[in-house]
Every structure is written in C-alpha cells, then in structure tokens.
Image: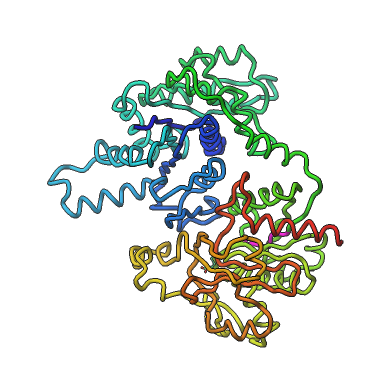
Amino acid sequence: MPRYIFITGGVVSSLGKGLASAALGALLQARGYKVRLRKLDPYLNVDPGTMSPFQHGEVYVTDDGAEADLDLGHYERFTGVSAAQSDNVTTGRIYSDIIEKERRGDYLGATVQVIPHVTNEIKDFVLSDAGEDVDFVLCEVGGTVGDIEGLPFFEALRQLRQEIPLGETVHIHVTLLPFIKAAGEMKTKPTQHSVKELRSIGIQPDILLCRADREIDSGDRRKIARFCNVRESSVIQGLDARSIYDVPLAYHAEGLDREVLTHFRIDEPPKADLTRWTEISEKLHNPDGEVTIAVVGKYTVLPDAYKSLTEALVHGGIANKVKVKIRWIEAEAFETGDQAALLSGAHGILVPGGFGERGAEGKIKAVQYARESDVPFFGICLGMQMAVVEWARNMAGIETASSSEFGEGGENIVGLMTEWTKGNERMERNKDTDLGGTMRLGAYPAKLTKGSLVEIVYGVSTIEERHRHRYEVNIDYKDRLEQSGLIFSGLSPDGVLPEIVEIPTHPWFIGVQYHPELKSRPFEPHPLFAGFVGAAVKQSRLV
Ligand code: GLN
C-alpha cells in the first residue's frame, strides 16, 4: 500500500501549491521512489472542460481523454508520469456520481448526506488504485482552507488520517509569510490563522511550506513552530525562484523531501540524484543566445491560458540552449494593426489552439505573413486549421475557404467530425451530455509521410499525440491542396483525418491538429518544439 502525502493551502491562492506538489514528487523520484500525483478540485464544474481559459487557465488533456486541471500539467512536466482521468476529481463530478447512484436506488433508502456519502466518494478517489509499486501518492486540494466548498475535502482528509495506518500519511500546508514594508517585518499571523483554521476542522499539519519573498529568520521559524504546533525543522521556507524548474533544487536545499521522509520514519532514505535538475538549471541560466517567438492568440492577457505552450517553448529553448522570449499578440489587434510592425524581430510565429471565430482572420493573416516572409511557423490545432484555410484561400484558389466553426457562407474546408461519434467508445460515452462531450479528446495515433519534415523532426514514422477539438480538416480537399504544394504529412492510421500539414518549400512550416505542448517535459523537450525553436535560432542568424 502506498503512503499518502496531502497538500493543502492557506492565506491566499496562487501560492504555487501545484508546483510545490510537483517539485516534491520530482524529489521523491530523485531518491528512487515511485510517485503518483492527484488533484482534488472543490469547484462545482464536473470538469474544467467547459471553463473559460480566462477564468481558470488552460484545460489540460490526459492520454485517456480527461479534461483536467492545469496542475496535472505541472505534475507531468516535473515527474514524467502520465496523468489519467483518475487523477483529478471535482465536487461536480462527485455530486453527479452520487446523484446518479441515488436515482438508481443504490443507497437502498438511506438519507444521502455530505458525511458519509460525499466524504466516502472523496476517500475512494484518494485511495483508488495508483498503479503498481507506487510508493507515494501526493494529493493536492485546490483552493484555500476556509473556503466553503473545500470543507468536504478537508473532512475526508481528516478521516483518512485516522483510517490509514499510523505513520503512513503526512500533511503539508502551504502558507504565505508577507513582508509588511511599513513595519519592516515579516508577519507570521496569517500563517497562524490559517493553521488555526485547519486545526479547527481537525487537521494538524505536519509540515508548513512557507512562501516568502525573503529569508525567514530563525526567530520567526521558532515562533511559527510554537504557534502552529509543528517541529521547527518542519517549517520549510519556499522562496520565489528564478524559474519554476529551479524549485525542486531549492526545496531540496531547504530540506523538504528529507523532512517528509522523516515524518514517515524513513530515517536513511536513498540519496537524491538531482543531475536532471541541475542540468536543466544550468542550461536555463546560461543560454548561448535569445530568440523571440510571436504567439498570435486569443487569450494572451492571461498567461495561464497557454501554460503548457509557454512551458513547451521554454523546453524548446533548453534543447537549443537559448532563451525563448515570447511576444504575445492579440489576434484581433493583428487584423487591423500594422502586422509587419507587430512581428518585426520575431524569429518564429506560433498560432496556438483556440475556439470560436473571434480573432480568426488575424490568425490567418499571421499565417500568411509567416508563409510569405519565410519565418518559421508552427500552427497548433486551430492554428493548423487556419494555416490550411490560408493556403486554400491564397494558394489553391478556394477564395471563400473557411471553417464551419465560423458559420456558413464560405466553403468550409474544416468541418465537424460527426464521424467520430460512430463506434468511438470515448465519443459515444459523452455524446449527448454537453459541449465538453462532443470533442475528440486524448491520445490518438498518426502515421507520418516518409521523408517529410515531421518525420525527420520526430525521428519515427508513427506517433501518438493528445487531441482536444471538434473540427477536422476535410480530407476531400487533400489532393487539391497538395497539388498547389501544401503537404499532408501526417494522417490518422485509416487515412481519413489530416493530422499534420507542412510546406516543403518553406524553411520550417508545420501545422498539427493535436497539442504537442501537452507532452513536452523540461528533461525531454518535445521534438516539434525543439525543432521549431531550432529553426528560430537559424532565422535569428539570418536577420
Ligand atoms: N476550435 C477548433 C476545434 O474545435 C480548434 C480547437 C483547439 O484549437 N483546441 O476543432
């Protein structure tokens, strides 16, 4: 049976709980342990699939097609362990399961209540099979202690600490130590209050991870330990790091993993091998140059909306030992603005995924600019669809080419993939539920054309990548578009769904229907991002 580490947060949100969980997972791995990370989200949405990226950041997609919280992306990037549907649960999912059971009569007449029914479901989620030989399951609870919707989750953790054998659980609470300028002092009171709140619902944390913008002095540590009833060595400081990929090293230096293991009474744990992280840090902080990538998208005001994309570009930078500077460009501004000025100095142009018509014409213009001026171009999902539309309009003589996502009126060369609902178990399951259900979600294979740029970039001929979209480029247009020079270099194994397009006469022009950014890791940069940033490096030497 695995051991369990619970991670909760207090004082304010955005303290980097997800990152702390991911970093701790990576540190335990570095000591040779096998880990699995899970996220419990107290919000009422059944999953984040229908939530606006403006509100909740990107929707992360797992291999098995779950639309999940973006923290699962951190977990995967730091540990390399592929997350699954069974690693993320929300209040909405739990209630919808319970109500389904209640309607079926499964509760045999019992009054259905938060305790025990909701808490039991939460406990079942935490304890569900984590995979073979997993040593530690790390469970992070979203939100902050004191939130009304979080209560059943905290109660479930409280119960679990009594039910799991003694010494097999550790509770880490992440808090904030603000520095008050006027007083010239760091204040421990918010942390004291947060722990008080936690203790009032029956949870005594073992370890406090205190986020601060400067060193915590020994007097403050002692005070926190005393007032919060933890050992002094269990007050761990979490200072702001230069890069998120420095966090595992920083927390290791502060003794986080050692302290966790001490609480588990593992007194002589295997030594941590942190080579992977020191190498990444080395490359990140000593780049040989810098490239600028222009990202022409729709959610550019909220960086979290493109979290995995941003990180994958950083990984592409690590692969080429350069710093990647991202220039966010609002696609709508691109429609009317001076495009050349907006893009001047960019060594690569990326059009990411997105939904809806707003900004589409701007994205098409960005594609055209990249194509005509030989600037490396990378189109992802909607970005690939826009690349095909641009080519159809300007190179293949289909002047009104468009996507049915933008309504009728044009010649829709991108359309709904109704075919996918037939006989596809994952699609059938969700078909008539909601908007989130009509998508092609999760990992699907694709075959790459021999001798194409993507085949060289990947170095293999079959790939598997994660999808999240409703529309597909219509295969019936393949011949016509290929005759004018756009190559369909990746197709679904049955040859029906276009997965990748490229322009062989262009220095680096690739559009992909899937989301490669979801599978990129700092220690294993995705080949497409490594290739794209590599092409941008070449471009930077030309201009
Ligand atoms: N809106 C497009 C579709 O549904 C693209 C989706 C995306 O970019 N993730 O097909």
Residue segment shown in magenta = 294-298
Q: Is residue 163 above or below residue 77?
A: above
| Residue 474 rendering spot, x and y as whole percentages | 53, 79
Q: Quadrant of the N terminus?
A: top left
**Which secondary structure dominates the residues rendered in magenta?**
strand
Residue displayed at 45% across by 65% down: 440
Q: Nearer the viewer, residue 400 or 169?
A: 169
Q: Is residue 105 above or below residue 431?
A: above
Q: Nearer the viewer, residue 476 or 229?
A: 476
Residue displayed at 59% across by 85% down: 479
Q: Place residue 120 in its image quadrant.
A: top left
Locate residue 449 relative to residue 173 in the image: left or right: right
Q: Quadrant of the C terminus?
A: bottom right
| Residue 393 rendering spot, x and y as whole percentages | 66, 82
Q: Is residue 64 above or below residue 483?
A: above
Q: Nearer the viewer, residue 182 or 484?
A: 484
Q: Is residue 78 magenta?
A: no
| Residue 11 rendering spot, x and y as whole percentages | 52, 30
Locate residue 344 relative to residue 532 in the image: left or right: right
Residue displayed at 74% across by 75% down: 505
Q: Is residue 243 above or below residue 229?
A: below
Residue positioned most to the left: 109
Locate residue 386 relative to residue 47 in the image: left or right: right
Residue displayed at 68% across by 37% down: 279
